[in-house]
Amino acid sequence: MGKRQNGEATPADKVVKSEQEWRDQLTPLEFEVTRHAATERPFTGEYWATTTDGDYNCRCCGAPLFESDTKFDAGCGWPSFYQPVSNDAVAVREDRSHFMVRVEVLCARCDAHLGHVFPDGPPPTGARFCMNSASLKLEPDENADGKE
């Protein structure tokens, strides 16, 4: 990836595809979650209870987003992490949908909707990045024990 300007991806870094190209690449659920900011039902996603060691990458562009050692059980039914792999990995913006004010989390590289971040997470950050499994793709460590 290229250089960052003010924490933003440069145009050369961005992955931009047409709606049809995203539809062709993703399942219907993955498309609705990542491209239209839908939310999968709690306790139904592929990774909400996964304990396998590895890296969680963007389902759309493959960018590294979270590491398994920052994942924790928040009891909310979605995979939760206390920090991304780097501050440049994700972007955030205000979300005023559903009569609430929340902070939406997006992949900084392709603008895929990942989920939301809340200020009720564990130390050391106090953040809870509550992500949709449909937005993520787990790349298990080579020595992962495979506990699911």
Image: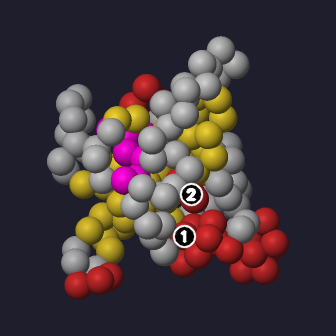
Mark 2 vs 1: CB contact within 8 A = yes
Residue 2: x and y in percent read 66, 44
The answer to whether 11 appears left or right of 79 in the picture is right
Instruction: Identify the disc placed on residue 78.
Output: none
In the picture as drawn, the residue positioned furthest to the top comes out as 143
Range of magenta residues: 77-84
User: Where is residue 99 drawn, in percent x and y?
Assistant: 23, 84
Picture quadrant where residue 16 is located: bottom right
Quarter of the image where the N terminus is located: top right
Q: Position of residue 51 (x, y in %)?
A: 48, 31
What residue is disc 1 on?
33
Give the residue at x 37% y 41%: 81
* Dominant SS type (magenta): loop
State whether residue 113 is above or below residue 71. Answer: below
- Examine the rendering and report whether any part of residue 130 can be seen: yes
Looking at the image, residue 142 lies above or below residue 137: above
Residue ID for mark 2: 135
* Residue at x 68%, y 74% (from the top left corner): 28
Q: Residue 138 occupies which quadrant of the picture?
A: top right
Cα distance between the residues tagged 2 and 1? 7 Å
Task: Pick whichever, 54 or 104, lies toward us.
Answer: 54
Question: Label 1 amino acid?
Answer: Val
Does residue 93 belong to the magenta stretch? no
Left or right: where 70 falls relative to 12: left
Badge 2 marks a residue whose secondary structure is helix
Inspect the image, locate mark 2, and give the three-letter code of the amino acid beneath it. Ser
Q: Classify mark 1: helix, strand or loop.
A: helix
**Up/down of 106 relative to 98, above or below:** above
Q: Earlier in the sequence, mark 2 or mark 1?
A: 1
Q: Residue at x 54, y 34 (%)?
A: 148
- Considering depth in this image, is 111 or 23 the residue closer to the camera? 23
